[in-house]
Amino acid sequence: LNRRLAGFGTTIFAEMSALAVRTGAVNLGQGFPDEDGPESVREAAVRALRDGRGNQYPPGPGVPELREAITAHQQRWYGVALDPDTDVLVTAGATEAVAAALLALVEPGDEVIALEPYYDSYAACIAMAGGTRVPVTLRPRDGAYHLDLDELRDAITPRTRLLLLNTPHNPTGTVLTRAELSAIAQLAVERDLLVVTDEVYEHLVYDGEHVPLASLPGMRERTATISSSGKTFALTGWKVGWVTGSREMVAAVRSAKQFLTYVSAGPFQYAIAEALALPDTYYEALRTEMRARRDLLADGLAAAGFGVYRPAGTYFVTTDIRPLGGTADGFAFCRELPERAGVVAVPNAAFYDDRTAGAPFVRFAFCKRREVLSEAVRRLKGLA
Ligand code: PMP
Ligand code: GLN
């Protein structure tokens, strides 16, 4: 293994899911739903397979039906106009989109600013692209995590090439406000930075609203926006994601994608095209159900003695384990939790450069059936 990747080890999600399988604990670690997405969408994939649509290499940028559906979705929800022929690229999940964007846009030695705690693949992909990661840390205050815009401004140097944003933010659940995003946009224009923004939780916002950075003035030409069907349609195994942006940004990302996977799996693309066109009631029901699950888990964790950061978005709750009175080391806590309580969670320190900063925080996922969440809460009650 080369020096760029040495030190990244095994992703925390694989480690914690393996622990759940080994111990039979309730898995609130890795974020994947325990109920599959809409039956009509799964049927659409079966039909595509049977009808021979997408069984051979689909077009490089993605099948036209899906590119048009992604375009229509951006227009419908955000009023963002895109050309399906040039401004959309279908990827193997948001994970490949992040990798391809960084490989395409970062020169060796460039600095990439990422919000910390950061989704774990960001650090590895910045390293694979030869870039230098510069974390800007979200700080916990008054029950939520906040971005300090002065810290962001101070982190920009002449070597900074790119900002890697994520809103709604995994693992903290923070949703950047329009005012914060406008300030970020202004900085990007002033300092001539590119932005890659990971918006996979765009439809999982419970307080406030999701504002796509690309919808703000001056951002269109310098922003690559990433999303994925995995979260919105509870189909994480299909790995259908996408990048949208200006023709130039998308062409750059496509240059990298063609040599990573060439194209993404065909039949699922037709089915996700149908999913994106589901009526507003689908999206509203998703948000309503997930908000109820957030409240169930957040309230239960608080009652069990955790310090709770109630998320404005995503399907994760970050907690502080110090009020429980035991260890303040989230890694140790998560490794012992299956035995102590029959539950698996993820230590937020896995998402920090400075692991001591993230040490006492632990993330629980609530993309699970309500009875599973209730059972987890019941098991956690004995901890304090
Ligand atoms: N970005 C973030 C912030 C995520 O939480 C995830 C989650 N799984 C991904 C990207 C990857 O998405 P996908 O499964 O579509 O590759
Ligand atoms: N995004 C999910 C999480 O944060 C899982 C993704 C993964 O396993 N790579 O838990």
Image: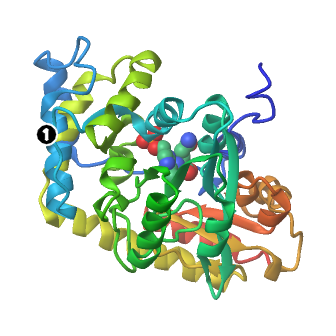
The residue sitting at 43% across, 41% down in the picture is 94
**Ligand 1 closer than 8 Å to label 1 CB:** no
Task: Give the position of the N terminus as an image quadrant.
Answer: top right
Whether residue 224 can be seen here: no
The residue sitting at 20% across, 19% down in the picture is 54
Task: Give the position of the C terminus as an image quadrant.
Answer: bottom right
Residue 187 on image: x %, y %: 50, 64
The residue sitting at 28% across, 62% down in the picture is 215
Whether residue 13 can be seen here: yes
Looking at the picture, tell me which residue is in the foreground, 165 or 275: 165
Residue 36 on image: x %, y %: 34, 46
Apparent side of residue 360 relative to residue 24 in the rendered image (left or right): right
Mark 1 residue type: Glu
Looking at the picture, tell me which residue is in the foreground, 238 or 33: 238
Q: Which residue is mark 1?
A: 68
Q: Secondary structure at mark 1?
A: helix
Question: What is the crowding at mark 1: few (fewer than 14 residues within 10 Å), some, or many (at least 20)?
Answer: some
Apparent side of residue 111 relative to residue 3 in the rendered image (left or right): left
Looking at the picture, tell me which residue is in the foreground, 215 or 166: 215
Residue 50 vs 22, above or below: the answer is above
The residue sitting at 64% across, 39% down in the picture is 110
Residue 168 on image: x %, y %: 45, 64
Residue 59 vs 88, above or below: the answer is above
